[in-house]
Image: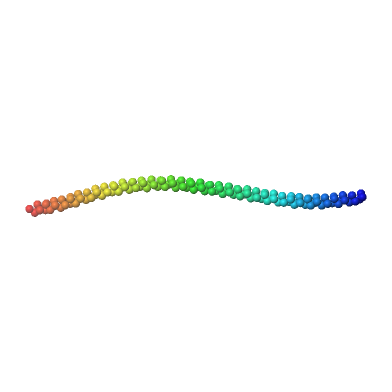
Amino acid sequence: NKLEEMKEDERILKDEMNVMQKYSTVLEREKLDEKNFRIKLEEELLQNSKNHEEEVQLRLKFESKLNNMHSIHRDLGTKYRRALLDIETLQNTNELLNTKKIEIIQELNGIKTQFAEQENKLAYDKEKIIALEKE
């Protein structure tokens, strides 16, 4: 009887040991799965950090280019306004020179007219002198 009880206890202990071994195997598998999951999460974190750093660098590069474009735009605006002022100045100068040219042409035409009149008078006077000398 005692032997049977001991055998029964041994059988129960063996069953419990088998259950515990299976449970241990399950726990080891879960531990391995958790370890793999942690490694995967660490890799994702590393990749996310790398992606974030690349995004920050790209954003900084974009902002730098945008700032350069704004600077170029301001410079072009300044040069454009300066060119408009230069054009206006040149147009005013051109108008003044054209007015002066017209005045000079008119004066020259007046001088030509006076010259022609003087030549005619001179020719008339020469003819008169010649006519008087013949008399």
The answer to whether residue 52 is left or right of residue 134 is right
The residue sitting at the front extreme is 1
Q: How many marks?
A: 0
The answer to whether residue 37 is left or right of residue 102 is right
Q: Position of residue 92 (x, y in %)?
A: 33, 46
Q: Position of residue 9 (x, y in %)?
A: 87, 49
The residue sitting at the left extreme is 135
Q: Position of residue 40 (x, y in %)?
A: 68, 51
The answer to whether residue 131 is left or right of residue 12 is left
* Residue found 8% across the figure and 54% down from its top: 134
The answer to whether residue 103 is left or right of residue 19 is left
The one of 116 and 67 positioned closer to us in this rendering: 67
Question: What scheme was used to colour the molecule?
Answer: rainbow
* Residue found 83% across the figure and 51% down from its top: 15
Q: Position of residue 103 (x, y in %)?
A: 26, 47
* Residue found 89% across the figure and 49% down from its top: 5
The one of 111 and 81 positioned closer to us in this rendering: 81
* Residue found 59% across the figure and 49% down from its top: 54
